[in-house]
Amino acid sequence: MSNVDIEIFKRALQREKIARKQAEKILEDKSKELYLLTQELKKTNQKLEDLVGKKESTLQGVFDNLVDAYVLIDVSGNVLEMNHAAKKLFGYDVTKEKLNVIKLVYKEDYQYAIQSFQQLVTKGSFSGYKSRVYTKNNGVRNVHINASLIKNKKGKPIGAQGIITDITEKLEQNRIFEEQKQQLSTIVDNSSLGIALTQSGKIVQTNKALQNLLEYPQEELLQKEIKDISLKNEYAVSENHMEKMNAGLIDNFSINKQYVKKNNSTFWAKTNVAAVRNPDGSIKYQVALIEDITEQLESEKQKEKLLEDLERTNQDLKDYAHIVSHDLKSPLRSIYALVNWIKEDYSSAFDKIGLNHLAMIEKTLEKMETLINDILSYSSVNNKEELQSSKIDLNTLVDDLKNIVLIPENTIVSTKKKLPVINGDSTRIQQLFQNLIGNAVIYMDKENGVVEIDYEDKKTHYQFSIKDNGIGIKKEYHEKIFKMFESVGDNENSSGIGLAIVKKIVTLYEGDIWLDSTPGIGTTFYFTLKK
């Protein structure tokens, strides 16, 4: 080999070494780059796995917490998965027992279920399926189902999924609502009150009662507005209320107004109008209840006149009683004075019989004055508005009456327990107790007379009793004795008006009075006074 050849070989070898080093450097750099890329891919894959895990966890949470039931099945109808709502609805747990959807289909709805399943296969989904299903624990339920097919990458069906909503309660509520709606419709149609449904013043619905009141058929009323059946000068009043209702200031109002019938005659009616509003507060429509009060307003005028006449008559009677009392007392006092003068001037001229006659005249005059005073008292007990109300300690009142009423030494008046403090007119309450205690004393025929006062608290009223062991009262007199000038026996100290006054006072205090009595044994008067 020549030197030239050797030199060429050396150079070639040198170039090869350089090229090899360069190749090794490129390979080393590429390896390093690939390593770094691999590490980066590992990190990215880990992040993706974490994200997928989180997504799966989130989706599982959504799946488990769906309000509606979710069911996943294979192409044979075997249930693969159920969420918590589905387990609760159907009562099955497919992780512990096998279940095919055929087992859930209600037998009478089987054909409908097959048709829906065919639609699912051919069209890929169905919605609005409503049917009954069997459940393990809850019997038969009504459900609404939306379902869709699940396909693989090649487009071949591998299963189906469905959202099932339990509509059992909803259907029952709808049934009840429709039933109530029908009942309401029946009530409205048969109501004695006229009923109108209006929108912006236009009549949109009426019932038979209103049609009869106005003497219009339904089809004619539906062509009219409220102003068409109202008097012009009165419509402005109701229109003012309607403006307030439209502005949201009021939701209802009531007025008395006149309506115009088809024959142009009118009638008075009480009208109650209520607004039915949309969710935004605007008025959807108004409901008007119309009651014919024409006869009532006649009767009310008569009632007012009667009350006025009665009030005037009562006042006239009261004035008359005072006048009669005054006119009668004057000659009585004159006669009483003359008798006293005769006794003083001519007592020596009278024998015992004559003096007895004068004494009888004096007693008669006293009885007449008592009678006049009692008539005046009775006439003045008229209405509760005239009573002066104050607190009355009945214990003090009874003690005071013991000093006023002439009580014989052989008779004891007592209270069984402490009496209450009541609100009332002191004069009237005193008259009430004084008359009853006085009667018990007057008609006492026992050597040891007993008059006992007691009471019971009856929530809204006090019930009092005044019991004695006197002569008693026969049953046939129990009602009679409360009338004017009626009394039991012929006791000279009785005017026959006391119990009539008692009855009137008790009535003023919205109470009742009655008695239990056995002749020869005694009597108990009971009466109640409103608190």
Image (tube, grey):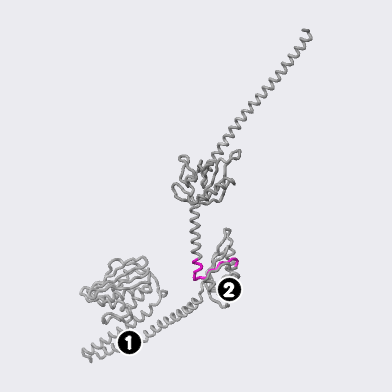
**In the image, what residue type sits under mark 2?**
Ser
**Type of residue at label 1?**
Leu
Q: Residue at x 77, y 12 (%)?
A: 8
Quadrant containing the C terminus is bottom left
Report the front residue among 477 and 90.
90
Quadrant placement of the N terminus: top right
How far across and how far down the image is residue 220, in percent?
59, 71
Where residue 472 sits, quadrant-wise, is bottom left
Residue closer to the observer: 74 or 245: 74
Q: Position of residue 329 (x, y in %)?
A: 34, 85
- The residue that label 1 is drawn on is 332
Please indicate whether residue 66 sits to the left or right of residue 496 in the image.
Answer: right
User: In the rendered image, which residue does mark 2 sit on?
Assistant: 230
The nearer-to-camera label among 2 and 1 is 2
Assess disc 1: are there few (<14), some (14-19) or many (≥20) residues with their C-alpha within 10 Å of its C-alpha.
Answer: some
- Tell me the number on the disc at residue 447: none
Chain-order first, disc 2 or disc 1: 2
Q: Position of residue 399 (x, y in %)?
A: 30, 71
Q: Secondary structure at mark 2?
A: loop
Q: Position of residue 45 (x, y in %)?
A: 60, 32
* 328 w.r.t. 218: above or below: below
Query: Residue reaching furthest front?
Result: 111
In the foreground, 315 or 59:
59
Left or right: residue 476 versus residue 38 is left
| Label 2 neighbour load within 10 Å: few <14, some 14-19, many 20+ | some
Q: Is residue 188 magenta?
A: yes
Q: Is residue 340 magenta?
A: no
Q: Residue at x 36, y 79 (%)?
A: 378
Note whether 288 is above or below 142 in the view shown: below
| Residue reaching furthest to the bottom | 349
Query: What kind of element bears circle 1?
Result: helix
- The stretch in magenta equals 186-201
